[in-house]
Image: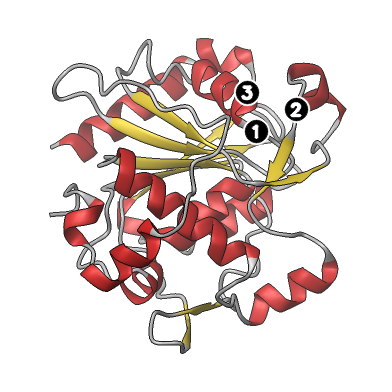
């Protein structure tokens, strides 16, 4: 059952290894489960961002107020500079990254994500959080967070690294995905010590939000191609690398999100 508790789906050995670590961090935002039948969504920020920004983004998408979705917000642990000056105006920080974007790290991640590295540590933190606070119906990521969502949603990750029988969530939402070119070449460390290429395409219902004027628009569309096209929904909004307030009044976007959430709730 894809919606089953992460803990019940895990092998005992892998579960114990996660329990030894304390992944709880100040700034995590875990909310009440809400009303019975309400969809639950775990939300991951982009590079040089944090939960303050994710909270604004999910508000502008009206996920809670119009779509009845309960959103938990999770941020990375490695601090970095803000993505841009606008984010510094919207949040006092600190700001975080899920994995490094330095050119040396970039080349390394194109080839192999090893145990002990920041990317694998981030994957473990997300899975630990799901085990503790889940289950979640879906997982949302903006920009770099969308890349993490996609890696997590491959069987190479949830089965090969974490020993699960099924993906712990039923759908993925990827907003303004950036830095996606290395996914095809990524080799991910497995529980047995080997490393494998990601299993693509990702067989999961997915909603992709693409900014018409986003400098990452091409990367966002590249990511769509890594998902099962028959299960993917794409909406192009009239903005850049952002999910700004005007989206709250975008009726076509509202209908797209509504129809997608209805479909995954059947």
Of callouts 1 and 2, the N-terminal one: 1
Tell me the quadrant of the picture where the N terminus can be found: bottom left
Residue 169 % position (x, y): 28, 49
Please tell me how many numbered marks the rendered image carries.
Answer: 3
Mark 2 or mark 3: which is in front?
A: 2
Q: Residue at x 55, y 75 (%)?
A: 115
Q: CA distance from mark 1 to mark 3?
A: 5 Å
Secondary structure beneath label 1: loop
The residue at the far bottom in this view is: 194
Distance from Cα at disc 1 to Cα at disc 2: 7 Å
**In the picture, which quadrant includes the C terminus?**
top left
Graded by Cα atoms within 10 Å as few (under 14), some (14 to 19) or many (20 or more), the crowding at tag 1 reads: many
Mark closer to the chain start, 2 or 3? 3
Secondary structure beneath dot 2 equals: loop
Frontmost residue, 213 versus 89: 89
- In this picture, residue 138 sits left or right of residue 198: left
Taking the image as drawn, is residue 243 in sight? Answer: no
- Residue drawn at point x = 25 percent, y = 42 percent: 135
Marker disc for residue 52: 3
Picture layout, residue 226 above or below residue 184:
above
Coordinates of residue 49 in the picture (x, y in percent): 69, 36
Q: Is residue 35 above or below residue 208?
A: above
> Which residue shows up at 73% across the image and 60% down it?
100
What is the secondary structure assignment of the residue under circle 3?
helix
Label at residue 50: 1
Crowd band around label 3 with a 10 angstrom C-alpha radius: few (<14), some (14–19), many (20+): many
């Amino acid at each position: 059952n894809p919606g089953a508790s992460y803990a019940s789906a895990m092998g005992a050995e892998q579960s114990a290894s996660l329990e030894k670590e304390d992944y709880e961090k100040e700034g995590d935002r875990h909310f009440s489960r809400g009303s019975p039948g309400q969809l639950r969504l775990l939300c991951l920020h982009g590079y040089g961002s944090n939960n303050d920004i994710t909270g604004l983004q999910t508000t502008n998408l009206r996920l809670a107020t119009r779509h009845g979705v309960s959103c938990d917000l999770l941020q990375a642990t490695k601090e970095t500079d803000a993505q841009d000056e606008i984010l510094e105006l919207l949040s006092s920080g600190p700001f975080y990254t899920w994995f490094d974007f330095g050119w040396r790290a970039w080349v390394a991640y194109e080839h192999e994500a090893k145990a002990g590295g920041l990317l694998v540590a981030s994957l473990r933190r997300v899975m630990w959080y799901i085990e503790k606070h889940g289950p979640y119906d879906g997982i949302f990521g903006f920009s770099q967070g969308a890349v993490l969502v996609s890696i997590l949603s491959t069987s190479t990750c949830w089965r090969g690294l974490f020993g699960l029988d099924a993906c712990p969530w039923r759908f993925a939402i990827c907003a303004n995905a950036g830095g996606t070119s290395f996914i095809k070449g990524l080799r991910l460390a497995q529980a047995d010590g080997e490393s494998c290429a990601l299993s693509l395409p990702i067989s999961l219902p997915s909603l992709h939000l693409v900014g018409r004027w986003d400098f990452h628009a091409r990367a966002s569309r590249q990511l769509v191609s890594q998902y099962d096209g028959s299960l993917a929904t794409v909406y192009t909004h009239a903005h850049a690398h952002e999910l700004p307030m005007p989206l709250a009044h975008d009726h076509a976007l509202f209908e797209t999100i509504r129809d997608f959430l209805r479909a995954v709730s059947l």
